[in-house]
Image (cartoon, rainbow, N blue to C red):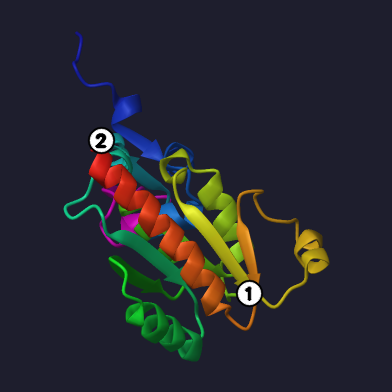
Amino acid sequence: MSSNTDPSREFISTAQAARQLGLSLGAVQQMVENGTLAGWKTAGGHRRIRQDSVDALLARSQGSATRPRPGSDRLQVMIVEDDAELKGMYRDTLGSWPMPMDLRIIDHGIDALIEIGHEPPDLLIADLGMSGLNGFEMIRRLRSNPLAAGVAIVAVSTLSKDEIAAEGGLPADTTVYSKPIPFHELHGYTQALVSQRRRVHNAG
């Protein structure tokens, strides 16, 4: 007696889902907990995740990376920073710039990876010394995720080049600025991305 449903494909493990999504086990577990992915726990406490919910999330992420957003001339900027004072400085300073920009500020690296899975920004600005999932690990995971290949990354840190290298370094295309936050340099960098996005939007 045959069946149209392949049980081995209907549900997958957390590790399998993490590989498919390019995220950590912890990120996938949190996505199950908050309902982003459909799953359940076995009697032994192991998570099983619906393959179709993973497929749907991948499709949405691919679409957001390749399909122009409404008002797509606006630059999507995500800042990952856990210091309240610095978050306020980012919000006030970038918010004052006369640029078509939408700003998201996230407290933790794990939350940023989940947000990026839903909608990758054009620019990510991250502190390297955050608690929990630090900026080094977050950026490495992000760069290993093909769904976020187009995200420009800026790291801001008090660490020297040698100290960053001692931590394992960062992907070669990461732009690194030293603290205190160099808003003048960030302004020029962001303005260049806005101009580039406007050219692409107008060409389309």
For disc 1, the marked residue is 129
Query: In the rendered structure, does residue 39 fall within the stretch colored magenta?
Result: yes
- Percent position of residue 115, x then y: 35, 59
Residue named by callout 2: 52
Specify the amino acid type for callout 2: Asp
* Image coords of residue 95 (percent x, y): 33, 79
- The label on residue 142 is none
Task: Tell me if residue 6 comes above or below residue 47 in the rendering.
Answer: above
Residue at 43 percent across and 37 percent down: it is 20
Label 2 environment density (alpha carbons within 10 Å; few <14, some 14–19, many ≥20): some
Between 141 and 77, which is closer to the camera in this rendering?
77
> Is residue 60 among what the camera can see?
no
Q: Residue 108, percent across and down?
A: 47, 71
* Residue 149 at least partly seen: yes
Q: Residue at x 33, y 55 (%)?
A: 32
Indicate the amino acid at tag 1. Answer: Gly
Question: Which is nearer the eye, 167 or 122?
Answer: 122
What stretch of residues is rendered in magenta? Answer: 31-44
In the displayed structure image, the side of residue 2 where residue 65 appears, left or right: right
Q: Nearer the viewer, residue 128 or 200?
A: 200
